[in-house]
Amino acid sequence: MYIIAGLGNPGREYEFTRHNIGFRVIDRLAEEYNISIMDDKHKGLIGKGIINGQKVVLVKPQTFMNLSGECIREVLNYYKETPEHFIVVYDDISLDVGKLRVRPKGSAGGHNGIKNIIAQLGTEEFARVRFGVGDKPKGTDLVEHVLGRFSKEDEELAAGKFKTACDAIVAVMEEGCEAAMNRFNG
């Protein structure tokens, strides 16, 4: 079984912000594989299903970004899964809009949601699909940037890459991180 989480913030006011790109990718994955994300438990919205014969639990933490690890830890504990079967997708300002980076492990890189997951799990060794949302313009506030919405052009660019991000997640499950990195990074 794989636990696949997308990071974001709950609430309509955050729905289409850069910081919620993880939620949007998980929604696309759920739609593609007909998985309903409706169960409100473990501090998150949960959906169970099958992707290409593999059992999965899709997760959208409802703890707000900076406490995402609380939800992830509860879900992993409940399903008795290890970080080796955990994949997270989230926004990355160091990548251009729509660019993807798959990684098998690593530091938080300044991302507070990932920092909290690392703290809660006690390891940096879990798969990540980083989704580029573009760097903040000079002289603007980082929080304002990630909690802001895309321009019309960037929204179209990002939305056009949701399927690719889903394919990268499935590749991590089926082929492993190394193969997914070779296919989707760059």
Image: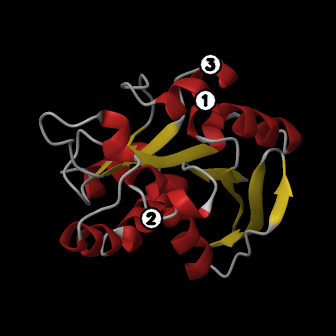
Q: Residue furthest left?
A: 138
Residue labelled with disc 3: 119
Callout 1 secondary element: helix
- Residue 97: x, y in percent? 23, 57
Q: Could you tell me which residue is drawn at 26 percent across and 75 percent down?
A: 156
Residue labelled with disc 1: 117
Q: Nearer the viewer, residue 92 or 172?
A: 92
Proximity of marks 1 and 3: CB atoms separated by less than 8 Å:
yes
Numbered badge on residue 16: 2
140 lies left or right of 172? left
Callout 2 secondary element: loop
Q: Amino acid at mark 1?
A: Ile
Q: Quadrant of residue 18?
A: bottom left
Does 123 appear above or below 18?
above
- Residue 155: x, y in percent? 29, 70
Q: Nearer the viewer, residue 64 or 42?
A: 64
The answer, for residue 174, to whether it is visible in the render is no
Q: Could you tell me which residue is drawn at 74 percent across and 39 percent down?
A: 71
Q: Could you tell me which residue is drawn at 27 percent across and 50 percent down?
A: 182
